Amino acid sequence: MTRYIGAIDQGTTSTRFILFDKGGNVVSVHQKEHRQIYPKPGWVEHDPLEIWERTQEVIEGALAKGGLSAVDIAAIGVTNQRETTVVWDKNTGQPVYNAIVWQDTRTDAIIAKFARKGGQDRFRKKTGLPLATYFSGPKIKWILENVKGAKEKARKGELLFGNMDTWIIWKLTGGEAHVTDVTNASRTMLMNLKSLDWDNEILKAMGIPRGLLPQIRSSSEIYGDVKSGLLNGISVAGDLGDQQAALFGQTCFKPGEAKNTYGTGCFMLLNTGKKPVQSKAGLLTTLGYKIGEADAVYALEGSIAITGALIQWLRDNMGLIQDSAEVEALAKSVEDNGGIYFVPAFSGLYAPYWKSDARGVIAGLTRYVNKGHIARAALEATAYQTCEVLDAMERDSGVKLRSLKVDGGMVFNELLMQFQSDILNVPVVRPKVAETTALGAAYAAGLAVGFWKDTDELKQNWGRDKEWKPDMNAKARAGLYSGWKKAVTRTFDWIE
């Protein structure tokens, strides 16, 4: 009797394998970090082979912890850090270069060149995306132009491209399935939102051969079976980019329902139904999910590059804390932010500004400020950035948000969640299962193999764990937010 669904959650800093039961509860989990490689300022890379190794290790670890084997598992889903780009040799399985991570800004010259003809929105009507270093297409172009022999091999059909989902599924299926789903494809800047296929005009403009690209499939169907290891013979049946997986895991199935994930970056998605809504306020139009043969569901997304990564920066670069969990106590050691704002534009500003020439700023410093104020300002930065995205979402969609469903590692930070509710002036709700990204991938896989009947059954699994209600007067809220807006302008146009 198969009692569980497995999910590989391949994230920016670590990989996890989580097993869920029919009620959507976590049964067993194992997690391992991988290296962050910084060859030059603004460059961020991962080793795809190391990530594949970690994937196998976490599968073994979670099965061992749960005392389980393949016979207990109905199917597995995959969710992944989006936009992170791998190009590898079809025959040897060897990457031609390290994976270029979504935060990497090396493609800024490529982006500037494209923008000279048609501006920042050159491909936005077709793809829903502005020209930005964030997306995979320009990263592929960089690899083809800068790795010796890559362009020639790509032309001959000897190379394959994938985001992390495609790489992991290709490895799991022994090279049989070179696929991606609509959500991941919609983050490449190469897919047409309406046809859900690669756009020939954009491929030509970027000089990317179509044969390099994976087949675009729905987010919930059987792509192939695992060919080796402890999960040998199990179907890989779900694939969603991490933020769309969280939207699905939070059961935001109706237009107007939204979630915010607090991870390395912060990502708010709003379900907009079966038609793409073009943003006038700096948001991304993206795929929400597509279940089997059903119509695709679209979303508006606000992407913030640096939130949890700012806490890691306080720990690793500044040594202000020994462990990320200590940031809350340090922030609570002061009553307020001491008049400072920390705008973490380390790799430019994402939504709603899309300024790749911005850089990080701490504004308002005086002799009074101590490390407690810096910790508090770092936490508040996440809440302010989320508020800017929500404002943009409400302008675009005309929908006033009644409450915000939240997930990700930072939602256990009480100070942050209360401040988030205060600055948004809406309740903030944490679900019982906070692992919604992996849960979304598990749900997609489970639907494909009949483990769950339909989305109504998934809705019944969702339960509230905690709710924070706003407790700040309107004048204080407006004053703080106005100070933030002023601080953000100080980051603009830093890079010539």
Image (cartoon, rainbow, N blue to C red):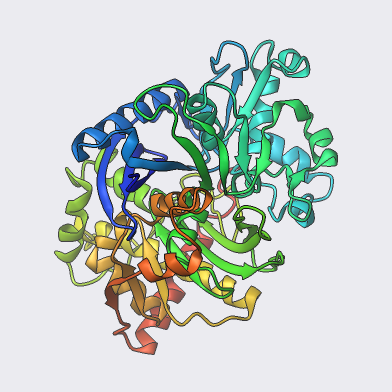
Q: Nearer the viewer, residue 334 or 218?
A: 218
In percent of the image, x 84 and y 45: which residue is there? 117
Q: Is residue 59 left or right of residue 388?
A: left
Instruction: Locate residue 443, reporting x and y percent.
Output: 45, 54
Instruction: Locate residue 101, reporting x and y percent.
Output: 51, 35
In percent of the image, x 55 and y 18: which residue is there? 95
Report the number of discs. 0
Instruction: Locate residue 308, reporting x and y percent.
Output: 35, 51
Q: Is residue 313 left or right of residue 180?
A: left
Q: Nearer the viewer, residue 397 or 323?
A: 397
The image quadrant of residue 279 is bottom right
In percent of the image, x 55 and y 50: which residue is there? 358
Q: Is residue 457 above or below residue 445?
A: below
The image quadrant of residue 256 is bottom right
Q: Is residue 468 above or below residue 233?
A: below
Q: Is residue 188 visible?
A: yes
Which residue is most to the front? 1
Q: Is residue 246 above or below residue 70?
A: below
Q: Is residue 208 visible?
A: no
Q: Is residue 420 left or right of residue 214?
A: left
Q: Nearer the viewer, residue 404 or 314?
A: 404
In which quadrant of the rendered image does the C terminus lie?
Answer: top right
Instruction: Locate residue 353, reporting x and y percent.
Output: 60, 59
In which quadrant of the rendered image does the N terminus lie?
Answer: top left
